Image (cartoon, grey):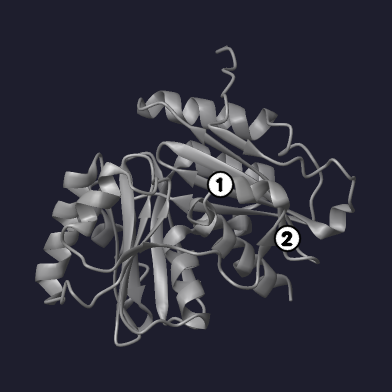
Amino acid sequence: MTSSIELIPSFKIGNPFREGGQEHDRHLLLEIGGRSVTLAVYNGEKQLLTGLEHYQLPESFEEIYRQLEDFLLTHEWIRKQYRAVWICFNTSDALLFPEELHDPSIQELVLNTVSGDLPDGDVINELVEKCGFYCVYRVPSSLYDLIGSRFGEESATHIYSVMARFNAVNPVQDEMEVVIGAGRMTVQLTLDGKLQLMQSYPCGNGVEAAYFLLNIRQQFGLDAEAIPVVLSGMVEMDSALEQEISKYFRETRFAEKPSGVDHTEEFSQYPAHYFHTISKLALCVSSAVA
């Protein structure tokens, strides 16, 4: 039997159980990435994030999922009682299919062709309401089985679905949104109010990030003087990554806190763009339980 490994949070905000609160008001939000995990507690009635912890995971594939399994079974916040638990997978093994073209019988073949074959993986599809897309993504079987037994499979979604749902009710005309994670970034391109691209790319540094964004610019014939690039996730203001992207796109800015969700005072010590994905997931929760 392997021993458990203690993960130390990169940062920890607030104590969501400090003032008690009622279980029927509380939701647990989890964002699970390839090399990171974020959990937050959300008060659905007040539409308020009350606490958050962010963890970096090791680079070893085996160690990541061993630690994740241990984490999901033992973390103090996860062991509390909630109205519901909502899990967002932020992984690169995913595609969006137009609803009219989605065929469950070949979805795994297409995913394997684009992303490569992962033998020990469950392929999941979900209809992204109001968007006209199916999100098809893959999760390691042991992790998905643990999620299903611990929280129920219906609790899971993917970052592509969360971003698409958010844009469906908060439309933009032209925008390239870039979500920075540990070693990867997710890019969503909207032109003339329509989703054109949702894809994950390697992102080890600013030069690599700029390389892929420049390829997108060329592929879609974008005007670098006009297309806004909106950054969110774990990226610092005035960082080398932000400065590199700004060389090629005139309007580069950081995402602001979405309207419709708030947070306790402790969150104000950190930039709002750190929590943009979790905030979008919270808005999906509010929509689902309304």
Callout 2 crowding tier (Cα within 10 Å): few <14, some 14–19, many ≥20: some
Q: Which mark is residue 69?
A: none
Which amino acid does the dot numbered 2 rest on?
Leu
Residue on which the image places disc 1: 270
Q: Nearer the viewer, mark 2 or mark 1?
A: 1
Callout 1 crowding tier (Cα within 10 Å): few <14, some 14–19, many ≥20: few
Residue on which the image places disc 2: 48
Q: Quadrant of residue 240?
A: top left
Q: Residue at x 41, y 36 (%)?
A: 35
Mark 2 vs 1: CB contact within 8 A: no
The secondary element bearing badge 2 is classed as: strand
- Specify the quadrant that holds the C terminus: bottom right
Q: Residue at x 59, y 19 (%)?
A: 6
Q: Residue at x 31, y 80 (%)?
A: 174
Q: Is residue 145 above or below residue 63?
A: below
Q: Quadrant of residue 80?
A: top right
- On the image, the x and y values in percent for residue 119 come to 32, 40
The secondary element bearing badge 1 is classed as: loop
Q: Is residue 38 above or below residue 156?
A: above
Which amino acid does the dot numbered 1 rest on?
Tyr
- On the image, the x and y values in percent for residue 140 come to 43, 41
